[in-house]
Image: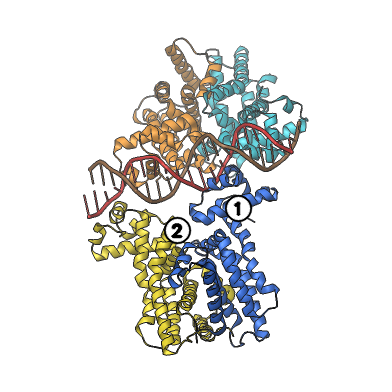
Chain colours: A cyan, B orange, C yellow, D blue, E red, F brown
Amino acid sequence: MHMTDTFQNLPAEKQARVLRAAGDEFARHGYENAKMSEIAAAAGVSVGSLYKYFDHKQDMYLHVIHRSIAEMEQLLTILSTTKDDILLKAERIIREIQRFSRGNSLLMKLYSGATAQNDPEMAAYFAREIETTSARIYSQAIREAQAAGDIRPDIDPDFSAFLLHSLFMMLQFSYACEYHKERLKLYVPEETRENTRDDFVVEQMLKFLKNGLR
Amino acid sequence: MHMTDTFQNLPAEKQARVLRAAGDEFARHGYENAKMSEIAAAAGVSVGSLYKYFDHKQDMYLHVIHRSIAEMEQLLTILSTTKDDILLKAERIIREIQRFSRGNSLLMKLYSGATAQNDPEMAAYFAREIETTSARIYSQAIREAQAAGDIRPDIDPDFSAFLLHSLFMMLQFSYACEYHKERLKLYVPEETRENTRDDFVVEQMLKFLKNGLR
Amino acid sequence: MHMTDTFQNLPAEKQARVLRAAGDEFARHGYENAKMSEIAAAAGVSVGSLYKYFDHKQDMYLHVIHRSIAEMEQLLTILSTTKDDILLKAERIIREIQRFSRGNSLLMKLYSGATAQNDPEMAAYFAREIETTSARIYSQAIREAQAAGDIRPDIDPDFSAFLLHSLFMMLQFSYACEYHKERLKLYVPEETRENTRDDFVVEQMLKFLKNGLR
Amino acid sequence: MHMTDTFQNLPAEKQARVLRAAGDEFARHGYENAKMSEIAAAAGVSVGSLYKYFDHKQDMYLHVIHRSIAEMEQLLTILSTTKDDILLKAERIIREIQRFSRGNSLLMKLYSGATAQNDPEMAAYFAREIETTSARIYSQAIREAQAAGDIRPDIDPDFSAFLLHSLFMMLQFSYACEYHKERLKLYVPEETRENTRDDFVVEQMLKFLKNGLR
DNA sequence: AATGAATGAGCATTCATTCAT
DNA sequence: TATGAATGAATGCTCATTCAT
């Protein structure tokens, strides 16, 4: 894959240190403006070592994204592991997004940066790396809900999975990324009490998911 | 604003030529990798002239985004100018998104790039520049639809405007940007006949908007 | 010479305006950092016109120096026009330097800049342009003073003219140029009352000129 | 200070090589016209390395000046280390100036360039860097000479130190810098035999210092 | 003659990548 | 394996000079 054998043989702690440093740098400055030297300094290793671990900056980025996916997919466990009603699951996901996105804003920025990648190769690679599992799990959850009668049978499970996940993606970004935070503010002004706003978002989003606009 | 007097006094044709070249370059390679020299060459002017027109690369980028907004806001006229039922409007918007995003994919990439901007100043600036009008018009349209009884009265018009627009944004990107095109494919495989897929998207999306999941 | 016919045929007022603007710019920023565009703006003419008046930036600089010499040579009239004792003349020159250098610091900076010119051609040209008259008049004044018995006959009039003028040059710079102002402060701290310090300089310098160190 | 740790840790030979190359370039072309690429080439290192050693061109210049001061202050040891009569010291200084300035003309040009610096910050910095020691030592020497009865007591030691040093500065430049070499020629034509002229300068200057004009 | 837009060579600076130790 | 100094191509930006109007 992207990393070298040398990296794989590193003590787990060192691997983690390097990946954390790289993730931070990429999230904070974007791929283009991220500096290998900064990553090295933050990880407490030399630039030379970085190039022993990864052949190129891009390989490192690819690997960082790759590793970050696992963290992001925590959210999906809500969908796949319990047997609750789909709207209950949705509520738990939304609340989890609020908590998780705020606490892992760098991860979200990394995600957001990946979605806007200009290089077609990288973009396609990322999409498949990041979204394949989501697509599968969301579709599956909807299918199950349809089987259980929780979701009406006349909508396409895959496409509604796409829509559902789209909304959740936008919500994730809205709690972590500058542009989207600002954007949300334009629709829903910040409240003094964050809780109130969060509850409001949960409530309204569920209404919308449940019954649509009409 | 961003551009100099010199630029303003330029023949409209030349202004357009420069902005088109810049827009293309920024869309294709992203802000960081866009080269002033490439823009100059593509516009058929000298680098020096570019710097007579804009003080910095960033000013040029800002202005290109600024100008692109007007083009993107074409879509909004569907919402604001007719008196149709909101779902009829939605249908027309979705079809328009399919047509417009495919035909102006560079514009969409520009938009997508702007939403992922890492610089907080720029991100916030973009958000307000780009989204303020959307926010107003979507919210307004929903309010009117509520007044007309086309949308149920118990949902918050601003937040549902946010959700509606979020879905449309994602749809726009899904027809133009690499990552999102790939992502959509994971949910809804491409068909031989593009029309069929487009109709399918329209139909399913309207269903979702109308009645939600339940 | 340096300027074109076009410049010569200009109304005197315009010529003056251009030269003043150029002199200011060259004095303030030095030859290298002086910008033709700034000069044009300050003079209220176009860059194009500047190049109708002078073929190159350097020609303009040369001419500005050339014209400035006349102003600087005002000081020399003290030496050449009166019949006073040489030390009386010296006193008047010193006082005049104090007044003139403070009031024409840009002119002094121009002078200082010319003496440090790196280009050998320009440096040699400047030296001859600027110093020829000084050399002649100082030498002449000393010779006359020797004839009048005011200066002892056993010193070389030309070389002592060189030394005398050297001291006056340094004094000029000490009232106008950053480096030399700072340098003087290291030897003679600034006083609250400028007059006191000026009188002190006059008195001490005359003592030194008159009797030397011994 | 100005240089980085990387530079400090360099083998002395390499440090010297870089500083010599930089000093030459700055002296020959002045700060503005000095090219980093030329310095790199002359020093046999890459441009990139230069920027590892110094953060900016200006830092390099500052450091070059800083280091040059030590060399120039060699002259001062004549004043501070022996117990000779002040005029004997002066004679030795003058002869040393003649020898040293001819042999280190680039150093002198560097010095001359520094005194004409237009930037007030840099000029003030240079003045204090370069002249503080001179001011102290010249003043001190004069004070001692007054105590010893070699210099009359009724002149201010600091100010006469200023005058003395002013004359020596001008003399230094007169042997190394284009403008001043040319200027000296206007007062004292070059002789076929350099020695004769040098002796003449020594003799006349001492006369002047000893007894002044009268 | 005057204008000021256009030109493009030129330079400081950056940073991914290499390599000697 | 680790280091970090060395490299040099690449790029944003400047500004003297030109030239069409």
The answer for how far apart the CA atoms under marks 2 and 1 are is: 21 Å
**Is D136 positioned to the left or the right of B214 in the image?**
right
Numbered circles on residues, count: 2
Q: Point out the image quarter for the C terminus of chain C.
A: bottom right
Of discs 2 and 1, which sits in the foreground?
Answer: 2
Identity of the residue furthest to the bottom in this view:
C149
The residue to which callout 1 is attached is D20
Amino acid under disc 1: Arg
Residue drawn at point x = 58 percent, y = 51 percent = D21
| Nearer the observer, A12 or B190 | A12
Name the spot of residue A139 as percent of width and height, x first: 59, 16
Amino acid under disc 2: Pro
Q: Is residue A20 visible?
A: no
Name the spot of residue D111 as percent of width and height, x first: 55, 63
Q: Residues within 10 Å of mark 1 (few under 14, many from 20)?
A: some
> Residue B128, relative to residue D9: is it above or below?
above
Name the spot of residue B171 as percent of width and height, x first: 48, 24
| Nearer the observer, B197 or A67 | A67
The residue to which callout 2 is attached is C120
Q: Residues within 10 Å of mark 2 (few under 14, many from 20)?
A: some
> Residue B188, relative to residue D159: is it above or below?
above
